[in-house]
Image (cartoon, rainbow, N blue to C red):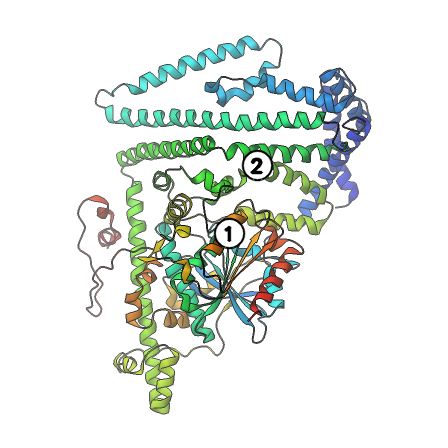
């Protein structure tokens, strides 16, 4: 790829400029062959057409004021205000715009009245749900219109100030399009900020967000009914599964902590056997376990931990960020529950350091919350080799308990 | 003298030059390709669920450990955007052994994770791991934006585990008069929002942030891109920033609820009524050395929102510093990120 190729790529852009300059008001058809000359001619025609004068600043200011004059005032029509504004600039479209206004008024009134009627017949529940969705959509539309009205006032304020700025001959002259644009951005953002910071805008913005939430909730209710009729799981089922998943994560986390504690205790026992009581005490304290606890928690049948690698098994990342090594840490990126197969030495250390003493774990309920929930832990079967089983929950969301589902599948 | 001195010919030439530059820039964009932030080698040293603790390398011998706690609403890679704009590298050069807590990307099952889980759970576990690994009773923390708020909460609840605390562009008073974000969030029905949306998608949050400066962030920024398109390095940096800005994880439903309701709407942190895990976050317990840094031109967290901390913590060990720049600029600016590292290093050597 070289500069010539880039020039080739630029050719369509320049051709577009020629066409655009010819199409400007007063362009009159055929453009010049040189794009620069075409652009110059086009700009001059535009300036003359806009204000009948050769002063670009005043021509631009006059054009902006025409736009301001053309902005419609009817607040109910904000959602299609801009298209109508631009369309109305073309001769002969005023009547069509007015007819469209009338149609929208009538349709809105009729649909609103219809949605207030109670649903009848065997499908009345479906009708009521659909009507609720439609009502929510209309509410959202009204809220959006109100918000647009405020945003339009910000634009109008910005345009007015920009026109004033253009006419202010006491300011330094403007010598580039970029300077014109940068000034517009600064003025427009300042005007936007002023409007946004008004108390009314905060309320209207919130009303719009709330209306969106209500519309979404109504749509969810309708789709939930659809899913129910098709025998598909509903949102509540997924929510219940998510909660159950979070609860299971708590349990796995606790088991992991307990396993780490036992491993630490086993390591202490090893150390004691190998090097005597003094070294065992030191090892216990390094792992945050008191020697007395370690002795209790390290019966002979406890599985011995595998030897730790000689160097910390941390995973390194490609510095470019193209590939991350998060998966290599636990083997289950994003869950971390199945830490055992891929657990690294620092991870073991983390578990030891984070939750070794039982007393500390009880004193910090949020430690469990980190695993996703603050739901109290349910009693777990302590029978060796037995899979913990749960009593099937009845009714409500618990009928989607993952335990029930797993039991049915097995 | 006319207000616009630009002749028609000069205007047209400028427009044509812009067009040529944009057209040629397509080639640069294609050659540069997709960019991702990240320049410094790092190792994942600890992980729980989606949360990962990284250690940047090479760690200086006998370096002072520093745990960076980032916000939930963006990826933390911004602190190591690229080699010449890396706060991490600047900190390493000052002798810091830099650790970074990455909250990861929450999934639907994480929607119940709230501030208590993040602060008392993950952050506490990571700090405990560091304390055990480094054999230190306490470690220095550096919080960024929302991560600074988390760090404040954590340090107030666990003052014995935090050796020193640095908060940067951190909101403390969420209802200062010039806070646009607070103004917009104030009247939202948060319960209805999280019920309807669940985890709040990163794109929704980005749209909110963009709406604070719509003309600059959605128009001017991209026109200025054309100015640098003939410079592959500058283009690559733009793309890295673009990737970082819009690579936003979702905010869990519970975290969204608590941030909006308890912080923005009720201002509980500043009022001393925020409770995590049944314990009230009392900022007056922040007796450790504390440095509070804010950005002068921050439009997301106004300086006043950060400066409010001075009135809420014991004065003896409190220091504050204002840096020129915006919410992100102080971390990725060519000179600004060095300035931040210098301030931090100087403060660490104070006592």
The label on residue B306 is 1
Residue B296 appearing in the image? yes
Image quarter hosting the C terminus of chain B = bottom right
Q: Which of B169 and A337 is in front in this view?
A: B169
Mark 2 Cα shell of 10 Å, populated few (<14), some (14-19), many (≥20)? some
Residue A297, position as x, y percentages in the image:
27, 78
Q: Which of A280 and B262 is in front in this view?
A: B262
Does B79 sit above or below residue A24?
below
Image quarter hosting the N terminus of chain B = top right
Does B319 sit above or below residue B178?
below
Residue A336 appearing in the image? no
Quarter of the view holding residue B228: top right
Element at label 2: helix
Q: Disc 1 vs disc 2: Cβ atoms closer than 8 Å?
A: no
Residues at marks 1 and 2, CA–CA distance in whole angstroms: 24 Å
User: Most extreme residue toward the bottom, as rendered?
Assistant: A276
Mark 1 vs mark 2: same chain?
A: yes
Does A113 sit above or below residue B283?
above
**Sequence-wise, which precedes: disc 1 or disc 2?**
2
Residue B334, position as x, y percentages in the image:
67, 55
> Mark 2, chain letter?
B
Residue A62, position as x, y percentages in the image:
69, 19
Q: Which of A394 and B131 is in front in this view?
A: B131
Q: Name the residue under label 2.
A: B214
* Picture residue at 48% right of the left edge, 13% below the top: A101
Q: Which of B85 and A119 is in front in this view?
A: B85
* Picture residue at 73% right of the left edge, 37% below the top: A9
Left or right: residue A219 compared with residue A145: left
> Mark 1, chain letter?
B
Left or right: residue B165 compared with residue A338: right
Element at label 1: helix
Mark 1 Cα shell of 10 Å, populated few (<14), some (14-19), many (≥20)? many
């Amino acid at each position: 790829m070289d500069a010539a190729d880039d020039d080739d790529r630029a050719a369509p852009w320049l051709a577009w400029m020629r066409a655009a300059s010819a199409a400007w008001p007063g362009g009159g058809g055929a453009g010049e062959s040189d794009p620069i000359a075409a652009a110059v001619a086009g700009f001059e025609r535009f300036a003359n057409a806009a204000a009948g004068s050769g002063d670009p600043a005043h021509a631009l200011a006059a054009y902006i004021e025409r736009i301001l004059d053309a902005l419609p005032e009817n607040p109910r029509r904000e959602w299609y205000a801009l298209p109508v504004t631009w369309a109305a600039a073309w001769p002969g479209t005023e009547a069509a715009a007015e007819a469209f206004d009338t149609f929208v008024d009538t349709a809105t009134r009729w649909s609103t009245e219809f949605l207030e009627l109670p649903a009848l017949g065997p499908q009345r529940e479906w009708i009521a749900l659909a009507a609720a969705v439609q009502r929510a959509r209309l509410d959202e539309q009204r809220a959006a219109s109100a918000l647009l009205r405020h945003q339009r006032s910000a634009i109008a304020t910005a345009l007015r100030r920009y026109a004033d700025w253009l006419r202010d001959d006491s300011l330094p002259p403007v010598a580039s399009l970029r300077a014109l644009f940068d000034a517009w951005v600064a003025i427009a953002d300042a005007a936007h900020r002023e409007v946004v910071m008004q108390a009314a805008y905060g309320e209207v913005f919130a009303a719009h967000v709330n209306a969106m939430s209500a519309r979404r909730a109504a749509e969810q209710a309708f789709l939930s009914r659809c899913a129910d009729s098709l025998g598909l799981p509903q949102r509540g089922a997924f929510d219940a599964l998510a909660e159950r998943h979070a609860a299971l994560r708590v349990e796995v986390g606790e088991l992991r902590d307990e396993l780490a504690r036992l491993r630490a205790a086993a390591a202490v026992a090893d150390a004691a056997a190998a090097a005597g009581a003094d070294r065992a005490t030191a090892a216990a304290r390094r792992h945050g376990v008191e020697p007395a606890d370690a002795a209790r928690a390290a019966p002979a049948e406890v599985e011995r931990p595998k030897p730790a690698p000689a160097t910390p098994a941390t995973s390194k990342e490609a510095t470019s960020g193209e590939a991350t090594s998060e998966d290599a840490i636990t083997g289950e990126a994003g869950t971390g529950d199945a830490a055992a197969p891929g657990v690294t030495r620092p991870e073991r250390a983390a578990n030891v350091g984070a939750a070794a003493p039982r007393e500390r774990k009880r004193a910090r309920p949020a430690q469990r919350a980190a695993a996703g929930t603050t739901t109290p832990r349910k009693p777990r079967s302590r029978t060796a080799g037995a899979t913990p089983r749960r009593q099937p929950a009845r009714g409500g969301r618990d009928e989607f308990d993952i335990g029930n589902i797993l039991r049915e599948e097995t | 003298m006319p207000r616009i001195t630009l002749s028609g010919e000069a205007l047209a030439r400028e427009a044509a030059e812009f067009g040529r530059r944009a057209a040629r820039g397509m080639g640069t964009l294609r050659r540069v390709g997709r960019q991702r932030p990240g320049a410094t080698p790092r190792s994942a040293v600890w992980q729980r669920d989606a949360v990962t603790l990284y250690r940047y390398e090479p760690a200086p011998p006998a370096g002072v450990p520093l745990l960076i706690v980032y916000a939930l609403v963006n990826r933390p890679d911004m602190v190591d955007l690229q080699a010449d704009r890396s706060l991490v590298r600047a900190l390493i050069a000052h002798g810091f052994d830099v650790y970074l807590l990455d909250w990861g990307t929450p999934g639907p099952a994480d929607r119940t994770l709230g501030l208590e889980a993040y602060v008392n759970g993950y952050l506490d576990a990571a700090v405990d791991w560091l304390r055990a690994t480094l054999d230190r009773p306490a470690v220095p923390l550096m919080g960024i934006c929302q991560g600074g708020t988390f760090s404040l909460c954590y340090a107030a609840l666990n003052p014995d585990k935090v050796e020193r605390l640095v908060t940067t562009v951190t909101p403390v008073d969420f209802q200062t008069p010039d806070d646009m974000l607070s103004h917009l969030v104030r009247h939202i029905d948060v319960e209805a929002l999280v019920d309807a949306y669940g985890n709040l998608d990163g794109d929704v949050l980005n749209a909110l942030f963009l709406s604070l400066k719509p003309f600059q962030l959605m128009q001017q920024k991209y026109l200025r891109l054309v100015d640098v398109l003939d410079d592959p390095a500058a283009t690559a940096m733009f793309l890295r920033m673009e990737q970082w800005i819009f690579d936003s994880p979702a905010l869990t439903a519970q975290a969204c609820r608590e941030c909006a309701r308890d912080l923005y709407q009720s201002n509980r942190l500043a009022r001393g009524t925020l409770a995590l895990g049944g314990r009230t976050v009392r900022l007056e317990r922040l007796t450790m050395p504390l440095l509070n840094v804010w950005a002068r031109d921050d439009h997301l967290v106004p300086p006043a929102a950060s400066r409010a901390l001075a009135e809420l913590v014991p004065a003896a060990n409190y220091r504050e510093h204002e840096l020129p720049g915006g919410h992100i600029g102080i971390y990725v600016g060519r000179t600004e990120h060095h300035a931040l590292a210098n301030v931090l290093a100087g403060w660490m050597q104070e006592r």
